[in-house]
Amino acid sequence: MEVPVYDLEGGVVRSIELPQVFSLEVRPDVIRRVYLSQLTARIQPQGRDPLAGLRTSAESWGAGHGVARVPRVKGRGYSAAGRAARAVMVVGGAKTKAPRSWKVVWERVNRKERRLAIASAIAATRSIDLVMARHRINSNLKVPIVVVDEIESVRRTSELHKFLLNLGLGEELDRCKSRFRKVRAGRGKLRGRVRQRARGPLIVYLNEVSPLKLASRNIPGVEAVPLRNLTVMHLAPGGVPGRLTIWSESSIKALEEVRAIA
């Protein structure tokens, strides 16, 4: 399968044959499982002290005292004496089913399964139906989008934005921008999640010291990642394959070594 190679002005300069990894079968089930594995790997274990609220001599007085039969602190002559403790409904008491730090939240997967998911997510970027289900693009656009290696030397955000407009992605950029402007409804505003970020085009490049990452971070929805750090989290946000991906020509050629994954 051949795809055109675009220059920074949006014109076609030549065509290139896609590597074998793009012809693999798309496995949404494997992609979803590996996505959940990488998502849960980011969760930091947290829990409560097992003895929290229980470090007291409280014991119930029993019936016949005209008071509730909750555990009360032993002793007399000081302020805490007779105060309710230990119970879950009292101040400073124990907590019902408190979170435990030893709970296993990381869904582990095999290494071959993880590599298969990455290869399958890469193959999903060539499906125009999967891409159009996630993004607003022209149906005549050839995916994946391959660009000359000059894209890796872009330093300014305005240059990158102009390049994306030349590719005909203006409607997609407007979608990401409008989503970012909207303020989230609900409690998320109080927890630092004021705005939701839409996932727009993903740019994959080969040179790890490229300034492209800095040039793309101020465009809502656009994300740039070196090929070495490419994961299912980038290719299938939310566990749904088919993200619009822009590859540099050198990164496409480097994928020839990925055929061993299949």
Image (cartoon, rainbow, N blue to C red):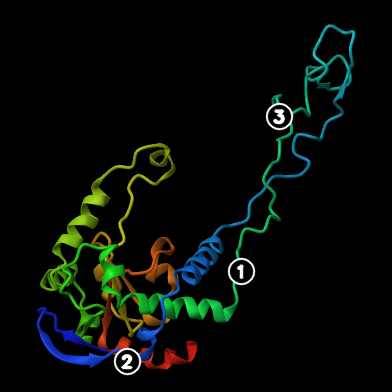
Residue 13 lies left or right of residue 101; in this view the side is: left
User: In what element is the residue under mark 2?
Assistant: helix
Q: Give me the C-alpha separation between circle 1 and circle 3.
A: 37 Å
User: In what element is the residue under mark 3?
Assistant: loop
Q: Is residue 204 above or below residue 199?
A: below
Q: Please state which of residues 145 and 83 is positioned toward the viewer in this rendering.
A: 145
Expressed as whole percent of the image width and height from the top left, the position of residue 22 reads 35, 84
What residue type is disc 2 on?
Lys
Q: Is residue 6 in sight in this rendering?
A: yes
- Residue visible at 55% across and 77% down in the picture: 113
Which residue was labeled with disc 1? 108
User: In what element is the residue under mark 1?
Assistant: loop
Residue 224 lies left or right of residue 45; in this view the side is: left
Query: Alpha-carbon neighbours of circle 2 within 10 Å: few (<14), some, or many (≥20)?
Result: some
- Residue visible at 43% across and 81% down in the picture: 119
Expressed as whole percent of the image width and height from the top left, the position of residue 250 reads 29, 89
Query: Alpha-carbon neighbours of circle 1 within 10 Å: few (<14), some, or many (≥20)?
Result: some
Give the quadrant of residue 61.
top right
Q: Is residue 101 above or below residue 132?
A: above
Q: Is residue 116 above or below residue 85?
A: below
Q: Please state which of residues 121 and 23 is positioned toward the viewer in this rendering.
A: 23
Which residue was labeled with disc 2? 253
Query: Alpha-carbon neighbours of circle 3 within 10 Å: few (<14), some, or many (≥20)?
Result: some
Expressed as whole percent of the image width and height from the top left, the position of residue 122 reads 38, 78
- Residue visible at 30% across and 57% down in the picture: 198
Label ID, residue 92: 3
Q: Give me the C-alpha separation between circle 3 and circle 2.
A: 63 Å
What residue type is disc 1 on?
Arg
